[in-house]
Image (cartoon, grey):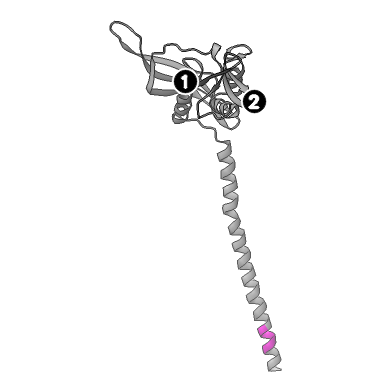
Amino acid sequence: MLFHNGKKFLSLMTVFVLSFILCSCGGNASDEKEPSDTTDETEVISSENSEITEDTLLDLFKENIYCMVNIFSINHLPYDEETQGGHICKVSDERFASFSDFEAYIRSVYCGAEADRLLNHYPYEDSPMYLNVDGELYINVDLAGAKGYYVDWSNCEITIDSADAERCEFTVKGSVEEPAEVPVQEDYFTNGVAVFENGKWVLEKMIY
């Protein structure tokens, strides 16, 4: 009888211990979910955060200057002398192995509407300077040219004038020194707008 009661006591103790362990494990399992929940919330906040900074604007503005000075307005990309149709030449710049590379770069700097204008209607409506020829990047040399540009942006300063989650207006300060018998360097200011489009900040228009 004593053995029987002892066996019953051991069984009860075993159940008690197992219940305690399971409850403890259940508590830990619940605690382990919290970091995951916190991480998900952080990711959502991060993906919705479109706050712009002067550093972001400076990076965009530098790419804009490269586009304006070296690709479109002041000068053009280098090209091979061998022509296709007399005035259509293949671009030789190694940065753009294909037209799609070139298009992706332009769209990383400018909003959709401005990128469409530069790719398809610059310098004239339906007369683009750069062409897609069998997937490769070509240039219409009749539409290319070079002109003087005397603004120095090497030490430019950017000031955010107004900004929200989708649009930012800003001012850029550089310097200009026009050709003259006695050149005089003066401050030069221009304004720009950046917009938040497709998950990134891009410029609304080319800035000169």
With respect to residue 25, does 34 lie above or below? above
Residue 127 visible, this orientation: yes
Give the residue type that dot 1 points to: Asn
Q: Position of residue 207 (x, y in %)?
A: 49, 18
Under tag 1, what secondary structure? helix
Residue 154 in the figure: left or right of residue 166: left
Of all residues, the one furthest to the top in this rendering is 181
Q: Amino acid at mark 2?
A: Asp
Residue found at the very far front of the displayed protein: 82
Residue bearing mark 1: 70
Dominant secondary structure (helix, strand or loop) of the stretch shown in magenta: helix
Residue at (32, 6) in percent of width and height = 180
Highlighted range, magenta: 6-10
* Marks 2/1: CA–CA distance: 24 Å
**Magenta-colored stretch includes residue 198:** no
Quadrant placement of the N terminus: bottom right
**Residue 166, x across and y down, in percent:** 57, 27
Position of residue 113 measured from the top left corner of the image (x, y, whole percent):
61, 20
Question: What residue is shown with label 2?
Answer: 134
Rendered image quadrant of residue 5:
bottom right
> In the image, what residue occupies the spot 54% across and 32% down?
50
Element marked by disc 2: loop
Mark before the other along the chain sequence, 2 or 1: 1
Q: Quadrant of residue 172?
A: top left
The answer to which of 188 and 135 lies nearer the viewer is: 135
Q: Which is nearer the eye, 65 or 98?
A: 98
Q: Nearer the viewer, residue 51 or 96?
A: 96
Dot 1 crowding, Cα within 10 Å, few <14, some 14–19, many 20+ = some
183 lies left or right of 114: left
